[in-house]
Image: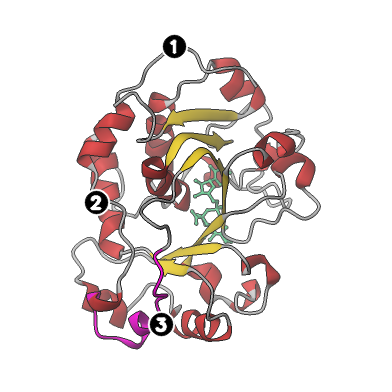
Amino acid sequence: PQAPNNVKSDWTCDMASSVEKFRTLEKNDIDHMLTKNIPDVPLFDDNEVFGTCAIISNAATLRNSNLGYFIDQHDLVLRFNNAPTKGYEKDVGSKTTIRILNSQVVTKPQFQFVSSPLYKRLKLLMWDPSNYTSSINEWITNPEHNFIDNYISFRKSNPRSNFHIVHPQYLWRLWDYIQDHTTAHIRRNPPSSGFLGLAMLLPRCTVVNMFEFIPSERMTHRCHYYHEKVDVTCTFGIWHPLAAEKLLMLTANTMPDQTVFHTGFLSIPGYKSPIC
Ligand code: NCC
């Protein structure tokens, strides 16, 4: 991969000053069985910062990318949902520091969340969509997917796990940021796990490299690198404001076109970079 070019993006600094600080649900946010099971330790300690961070999309364009070795050199690697590394190491690497999971993955039996080894020995962060105006009480009594039992049984069988839940109202502050910086009207659905990952890591990393969020020349109509399903909406969005998210990522990118469209990643300076 090539070195970053000289374009200095003020996007990072704007985001740092205008998006609410990343927030997970805390024990005292609500009196509920769920919050009683939240770990005592935070997802990241205040002083837990990283040089290079890698965010690996689930996109099919990662196949045949040969990016695995480069990905594993990063200080932190973030992956999503049930995306595997086993068998795909050459293209996606094998290191995983943290996974972001949507509540479907925690809830639906097909993902075997409580028993699968995929979710052990790493940090976990889950999110579940609320309505834009819902209070936290309204959300918890009627979550989009009923993840609560599985969250509690996972925490009980893995008491040392560092598994947190995004504060549902934080997702909407992130959505506000996307809408405020997008000319088109976007649908009122929360940002994708990918954009949430970027917002979570920018404050902790000097640089965030994002793999195949902008589709490279390996683009096909397939959805994920780990199966054959054809669905182009995975790449351009149907429910999440994915296209708007990707344009913002591209605006903040400091890598040349060759790296983005041929190699397959873009690079965004984090709040720990000296530019702000
Ligand atoms: O596909 P998904 O997304 O798990 O991908 C994680 C993140 O990678 C980026 N991505 C993915 C595929 C692709 N072709 N291009 C991409 O850029 C996106 O930024 C995406 O957020 C999710 O965000 O949690 C999502 O989860 C899936 C699905 O629930 C899980 O994969 C589990 O099966 C959603 N699909 C469906 O519900 C059918 C998807 O909408 C969002």
Residue labelled with disc 1: 6
> Identity of the amino acid at label 2?
Arg
Q: Quadrant of residue 244?
A: top left
- The percent coordinates of residue 67 (x first, y second) are 71, 34
Q: Earlier in the sequence, mark 3 or mark 1?
A: 1
> Identity of the amino acid at label 3?
Asn
- The percent coordinates of residue 51 (x first, y second) are 50, 37
Q: Could you tell me which secondary element the residue under label 1 belongs to?
A: loop
In the drawing, does residue 172 fall left or right of residue 146?
A: left
Residue labelled with disc 2: 173
Task: Identify the coloring.
Answer: secondary structure
Q: Disc 1 beta carbon < 8 A from ligand 1?
A: no
Pick out the residue farthest to the right.
87
- The percent coordinates of residue 58 (x first, y second) are 61, 48
Q: Is residue 73 visible?
A: yes
Q: Could you tell me which secondary element the residue under label 3 belongs to?
A: loop
Which secondary structure type mostly characterizes the magenta part of the structure? Answer: loop
Range covered by the magenta-colored residues: 29-42
Q: Earlier in the sequence, mark 2 or mark 3?
A: 3
Quarter of the picture containing the N terminus is: top right
- Residue displayed at 37% across by 32% down: 248
Number of the front mark, 2 or 3: 3
Q: Is residue 184 visible?
A: no
Residue labelled with disc 3: 37
Q: CA distance from mark 2 to mark 3?
A: 25 Å
